[in-house]
Image (tube, helix red, strand yellow):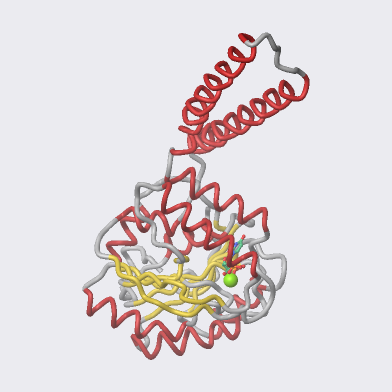
Amino acid sequence: MRRPDQSSAPSPLLSIVVPCYNEEACLPELHRRLSAAARAAVGDAHEIVLVNDGSRDASWRVMQTLAAADPHVVAVNLSRNHGHQLALTAGLDLCGGARILIIDADLQDPPELLGAMMAEMDAAEADVVYAVRRQREGETWFKRASAAGFYRLLSRLSPTPIPVDTGDFRLMSRRALDALLSLPEQARFIRGMVAWIGFRQVPFLYDRAERHAGTSKYPLAKMIAFALDAVTGFSVAPLRLASHFGLWLGAASVLLLGYILIAWARGATVEGWTSLMFVVVTLGAVQMFVLGMIGEYLGRLYIEAKRRPLYLVADIVGGDHDGRRASA
Ligand code: UDP
Ligand code: MG
């Protein structure tokens, strides 16, 4: 944890931050494997920050038990479900380590890679070692195809190069994390924000495992919201769509006019209803789509302008916060 000045406890060498939503079945095994990996890498000088993102199962109770049994565990209870990226932000805000590992709770990202990622960070003198998925086990065809398409589309749209097939699983230095935390936005696409901060970042290839237990906490609606956060957060290209459509439709209208004039010169008139309906409906669709895109950015601007806190913490247990209720 980030310790208040009066505390003399040293900062840990390593913080592991895990956002958790309905992961009761994964937590004990996660703790066992994370603990072993952290111990092998840095001995006792580690902390494991588990963030409960408003789970509706027994996750928070399991976390409290883990924190009671292991002084390295800090359990943070958010006031409600704030979403994966904000739960992760809460953990990153609170952790105090010199190096920080971000990992999912479902053990799709193997904790045992920690040692190799630390070695890579030392060898490359890197600030960020980001894990790139070489293969994804046990995920649906749709999930793999949509993820592959999404990362490629995003890297084409975004002026910031965002590595493809890379999740949040990564090791960061303290200065990289502090840089990340200085970005204030509400709509947080953390893997992109880390790419934006720069410093020296190196990839680390791995095979993504199957979920240890439970089902994905990213249904289609959340995946779409996540993709929209990413695109609107890192590109204004969709706002130019209106101009592009305008140019193409302008060109089409010139061709159409030529066609009509030639037909008219030959004494024929162009037949009406079908072609007219086609043009009206197509134009309507294009206009609605473009309006929706503008609305998407406008809505986000409005949400950012309110400047609400990113998340609210209800309780923190473990570390130097034992038994204390967080004020906010
Ligand atoms: N998660 C979260 N809040 C949410 C949804 C997900 O904290 O609202 C956590 C979840 O517990 C997991 C991580 O985010 O640790 C990634 O979710 P998941 O593994 O379900 O996503 P997938 O791997 O299927 O994309
Ligand atoms: Mg997962």
**Residue 257 occupies quadrant:** top right
Instruction: Find residue 282 and report its horizontal and vertical position in percent.
Output: 66, 29
Q: Is residue 319 left or right of residue 24?
A: left
Residue extending furthest front? 266
Instruction: Find residue 299 and report its horizontal and vertical position in percent.
Output: 56, 34
Give the quarter the ligand 2 occupies. bottom right
Q: Residue at x 58, y 79 (%)?
A: 137
The N terminus, quarter of image: bottom left
Q: Is residue 33 left or right of residue 171?
A: right
Q: Is residue 322 visible?
A: no
**Residue 177 occupies quadrant:** bottom left
Residue extending furthest right? 273
Q: Residue at x 43, y 87 (%)?
A: 37
Instruction: Find residue 173 and report its horizontal and vertical position in percent.
Output: 30, 68
Q: Is residue 53 left or right of residue 37?
A: right
- Does residue 213 lie above or below 310 as drawn? below
Q: Is residue 9 visible?
A: yes
Q: Residue at x 48, y 59 (%)?
A: 90
The foreground one among 263 and 65 is 263
The foreground one among 169 and 241 is 241
**Residue 222 occupies quadrant:** bottom right
